[in-house]
């Protein structure tokens, strides 16, 4: 049982980490920054949607709308801070004579986010939707839906 779980974990790990590739520090930093940005964006958007739903469901009562409006405000501020950090921090590091903009630039971060999301969610080119196999008729007894 343990061996099957360990082999499945190793197989899943090999999807993310290529064993034949030698990773350098800038690769690790770029992936870490991309993961933090991706996770924080997803979290901020989730909270924005969640609190917007809570605002709608509050019945527009003052004691329920005030926390929802504040949370929506904070999630928007968080998104703005993330965007500013992505674009301003490489310039600040370059002004301090630390040449990190080659692997912390917005282009490199967004490219890494794209590669991570492709590994995790798959590519849009991987979808195979063939409409020729679809039928417009439902079965009479609905047995094979």
Image: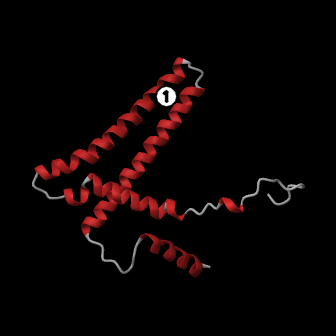
Residue 59 is situated, as x and y percent measured from the top left of the image, at 60, 21
Q: Quadrant of the C terminus?
A: bottom right
Residue 117 in which image quadrant: bottom left
Of 47 and 21, which appears nearest the observer? 21
Residue at 72% of width from left, 58% of height from top?
134
Q: Quadrant of the N terminus?
A: bottom right
Residue 92 is situated, as x and y percent measured from the top left of the image, at 16, 47
Residue 68 is situated, as x and y percent measured from the top left of the image, at 49, 28
In the rendered image, the vertical position of residue 89 relative to residue 115, given as above or below:
above
Q: Which residue corresponds to mark 1?
A: 68
| Residue 140 in view | yes
Of 11 and 114, which appears nearest the observer? 114
Residue at 24% of width from left, 54% of height from top?
105
In the rendered image, the vertical position of residue 62 relative to residue 11, given as above or below:
above
Residue at 28% of width from left, 52% of height from top?
106
In the rendered image, the vertical position of residue 38 relative to residue 53, given as above or below:
below
Residue at the top extreme of this rendering: 62
């Amino acid at each position: 049982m343990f061996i099957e779980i360990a082999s499945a974990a190793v197989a899943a790990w090999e999807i993310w980490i290529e064993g034949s590739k030698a990773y350098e520090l800038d690769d690790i930093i770029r992936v870490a920054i991309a993961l933090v940005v991706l996770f924080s964006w997803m979290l901020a958007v989730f909270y924005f949607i969640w609190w917007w739903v809570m605002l709608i469901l509050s019945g527009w009562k003052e004691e329920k709308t005030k926390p929802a409006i504040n949370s929506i405000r904070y999630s928007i501020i968080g998104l703005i801070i993330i965007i500013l950090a992505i674009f301003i921090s490489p310039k600040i590091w370059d002004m301090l004579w630390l040449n990190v903009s080659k692997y912390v630039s917005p282009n490199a971060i967004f490219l890494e986010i794209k590669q991570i999301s492709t590994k995790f969610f798959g590519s849009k080119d991987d979808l195979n939707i063939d409409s020729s196999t679809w039928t417009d008729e439902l079965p009479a007894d609905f047995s094979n839906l």
